[in-house]
């Protein structure tokens, strides 16, 4: 249990929408920063719903939509930084270094020209 306390967790502030187009408003290892973002977003959501005006976000994307489309705003612990940096999957490590196309062989052509007789 003590080892878990020493690891830094990574948190995401999520705006969950009813149309399943969820928005990651912030990703950080600082919980207080995520909590402040959550407070701002929930206050804005409440105000927009009360005044019947669009909910607007300018970071990380610029968008505006009805506050009724939001089902929930939450903070989710994603993973620890240590687990992210210590992946033992060689394919994942190679993909992160070389890119997806170069991981499983040279010249992978995603556009294969379709079925040929």
Image (cartoon, rainbow, N blue to C red):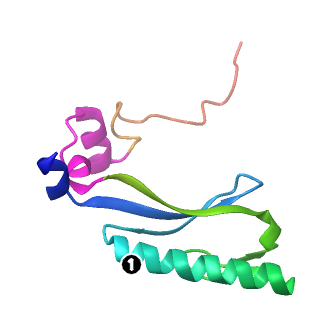
Q: Residue at x 23, y 47 (%)?
A: 83
Q: In the rendered view, would you say 96 is above or below 109? A: below
Q: Is residue 116 above or below residue 93?
A: above
Magenta highlight range: 80-99
Residue 116 horizontal side relative to residue 4, left or right: right
Task: Identify the residue at horizontal 55%, vertical 36% (top origin).
Answer: 110
Residue 17 seen from this side: yes
* Residue 89 lies in the magenta-colored region: yes
- Residue to which mark 1 is pinned: 33
Judge whether residue 54 can be spotted in this image.
no
Question: Residue 46: percent from the left, percent from the top?
Answer: 72, 79
**Foreground of the two, 4 or 104:** 4
Does 80 sit above or below residue 44? above
| Element type where label 1 sits in the image | helix
Asked whether 66 or 105 is in front, the reply is 66
Instruction: Please state if 19 lies on the left or on the right of 27 as rendered.
Output: right
Residue drawn at 36 percent across, 47 percent down: 99
Where is residue 77? Give x, y as percent. 39, 55
> Residue at position x 64%, y 82% from top?
43
Q: Does residue 19 appear left or right of residue 105 in this picture?
A: right
Nearer the observer, 89 or 37: 37
In the picture, residue 111 is in which quadrant? top right
Depth check, front residue: 71 or 96: 71
- The quadrant of the picture occupied by the C terminus is top right
């Amino acid at each position: 249990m003590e080892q878990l306390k020493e690891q830094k967790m990574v948190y995401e502030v999520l705006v969950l929408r009813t149309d399943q187009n969820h928005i990651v408003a912030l990703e950080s290892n600082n919980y207080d920063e995520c909590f402040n973002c959550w407070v701002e977003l929930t206050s804005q959501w409440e105000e927009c719903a009360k005044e019947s005006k669009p909910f607007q976000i300018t970071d990380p994307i610029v968008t505006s939509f009805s506050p009724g489309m939001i089902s929930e705003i939450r903070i989710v612990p994603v993973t620890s930084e240590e687990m992210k940096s210590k992946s033992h999957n060689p394919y994942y490590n190679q993909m992160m270094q070389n890119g997806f196309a170069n991981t499983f062989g040279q010249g992978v052509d995603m556009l294969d020209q379709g079925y040929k007789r």
